[in-house]
Image (cartoon, rainbow, N blue to C red):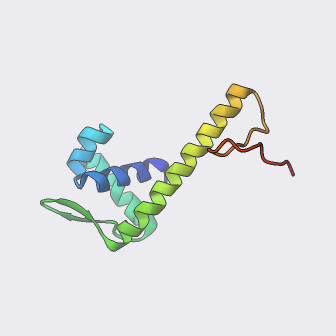
């Protein structure tokens, strides 16, 4: 599973449409997006979206999965922010929370 699979899934869930998500949010083709979503469903072993002529809806598994997908992406973003802070400050021991706490103790 790749991070893009999670991003694609969230975009489809938020728009309720593979076509809209592909064209307006992800700037990719609808067949490619459909294939990526099917790959994700295969990897997790459950159907995440219910597809119909009127669009897509999250299945029960999809509703449970989307919270985990959002959390995973948020955690990746947090690591990227921390890495940029370290690079900007030139420090390897910089580990601050969003509230600006002191650096974490070293082990």
Residue nearer the viewer, 73 or 106: 106
Give the vertical position of 46 relative to 20 (above or below).
below
Q: Residue at x 66, y 33 (%)?
A: 85
Question: How many marks can you see?
Answer: 0
Residue reaching furthest to the left:
53
Residue reaching furthest to the right:
107
- Give the image quarter of residue 58: bottom left
Residue 102 on image: x %, y %: 76, 43
Q: Residue at x 24, y 40 (%)?
A: 23
Q: Residue at x 42, y 65 (%)?
A: 65
Q: Residue at x 37, y 71 (%)?
A: 61
Give the vertical position of 99 relative to 88 (above or below).
below
Residue 45 on image: x %, y %: 42, 70
- Give the image quarter of residue 41: bottom left
- Residue 40 left/right relative to 1: left
Residue 67 on image: x %, y %: 44, 62
Give the vertical position of 95 relative to 40 (above or below).
above
- Residue 49 left/right relative to 54: right
Residue nearer the viewer, 43 or 84: 84
- Give the image quarter of residue 37: bottom left
The answer, for residue 34, to whether it is visible in the render is: no
The answer, for residue 44, to whether it is visible in the render is: yes
Residue 11 on image: x %, y %: 33, 49
């Amino acid at each position: 599973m790749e991070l893009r699979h999670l991003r694609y899934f969230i975009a489809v869930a938020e728009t309720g449409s593979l076509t809209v998500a592909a064209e307006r949010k992800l700037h990719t083709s609808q067949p490619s997006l459909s294939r990526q979503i099917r790959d994700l469903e295969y990897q997790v072993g459950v159907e995440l979206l219910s597809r119909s002529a009127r669009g897509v809806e999250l299945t029960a598994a999809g509703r449970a999965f989307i919270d985990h997908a959002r959390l995973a992406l948020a955690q990746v973003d947090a690591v990227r922010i921390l890495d940029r802070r370290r690079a900007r400050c030139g420090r390897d021991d910089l580990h601050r929370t969003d509230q600006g706490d002191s650096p974490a103790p070293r082990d």
